[in-house]
Image (tube, rainbow, N blue to C red):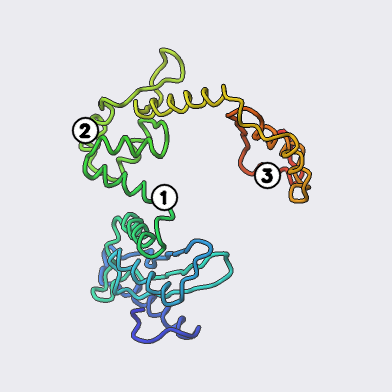
Amino acid sequence: MGFGFEVVTEEDADLARRIMEFAAQNQASRTRPCEKDCLHLSLAWRPGEKPTIEQMEAAARDALKAIGMENARALFAVHTDEAYFHIHIVASKINPATGRAYDLKGNFLKLSRWAEEYERTQSGGIVCVGREEANELRDAIEKRDTDAVLELMTKQRATFTAREMDRILRKQIKKATDREQFASRIFGHRDIVALSDDADGPITRYTTKTVLEGECYVLRAAQGLNRSHRHGVPDGTRAALLAGEKFASITHEQASAVRHATGVGGLALIAGQAGTRQELHHGGDPRDL
């Protein structure tokens, strides 16, 4: 886009590339020229989604518009060597209207919000929940809403350190005095609870009364389930299941996990490290399960 001619062949793309290079070498600004003069973005759809070329190109144009580069010179490339559809964008950072670099301050945050809205309207709902929560947290910081900040911080993690809080606030609040004042309001909040690793030791982390109450509720529910012994699968049913062809290749440890989970107790816990299944199939230590 932005070249005044259609880019179809490799020769077209090479000419477009040279036009972008010429713009970079002949910027209007002589005192502070843009050195990293191209922007590379990759937009990916989740496995199973099959957008058309036209839909992918429209998304690429819309993403550039979200960061103020709707008139940019850009090349798009689509290839199918991955299990998901994606499009690459290589765009010149030199605005053809001014000969100067675009102001891309905060472009990451703008793209994050654009991607969230795209999922909401074009993909049938939010796919990346983490992105949505991160944007909600940014909004809460912008509004200086201490209640919402604490709720969203502990939604992502049960506890947090003062350094983690400062790192998150620093991204949104650039002025140190403003950041310190808001942090003081957060750590003085009626719901916050200071934690230490040892009794009477120094404060190392923070959580909230709401999180602790939720954890206590889960523990009480677990204790109630643990006292119940009415949930067992009959031995004959379990044995027939494990003897079936579908489960012929499972390991002894995996079979033990099935027996444990289908026992009479109302609560059963199974802990497995990430990648354990693959390790077991390739000679890993069965004790990892």
Label 2, label 1: how far apart the Cα atoms are: 30 Å
Query: Where residue 63 sits in the image (x, y, percent)?
Result: 35, 66
Query: Where residue 169 sits in the image (x, y, percent)?
Result: 30, 40
> How many C-alpha atoms fall within 10 Å of the one at disc 2: few (<14), some, or many (≥20)?
few
Identity of the residue furthest to the top in this view = 200
Q: Is residue 50 above or below residue 162?
A: below
Q: Is residue 256 above or below residue 110?
A: above
Q: Quadrant of the C terminus?
A: top right
Callout count: 3
Which of the two discs, 2 and 1, labels the residue nearer the N terminus?
1
Label 2, label 3: how far apart the Cα atoms are: 48 Å
Query: Where residue 225 sits in the image (x, y, percent)?
Result: 54, 26
Query: Where residue 99 sits in the image (x, y, percent)?
Result: 26, 73
> How many C-alpha atoms fall within 10 Å of the one at disc 3: few (<14), some, or many (≥20)?
some
What residue do we see at 78% from left, 47% from top?
248
With 99 as the anchor, is 273 left or right in this view? right
Q: Is residue 233 above or below residue 201?
A: below
Please give the label number shown on residue 129: 1
Identify residue type, mark 2. Answer: Gln
**Foreground pick, 256 / 26:** 256
Judged by depth in the image, the label closer to the viewer, 2 or 1, is 1
Identify residue type, mark 1. Answer: Val
With 228 as the anchor, is 134 left or right in this view? left
What residue do we see at 21% from left, 33% from top?
181
In this figure, which residue is indicated by the disc labeled 3? Answer: 277
Q: Secondary structure at mark 1?
A: helix
In this figure, which residue is indicated by the disc labeled 2? Answer: 181
Label 3, label 1: how far apart the Cα atoms are: 26 Å
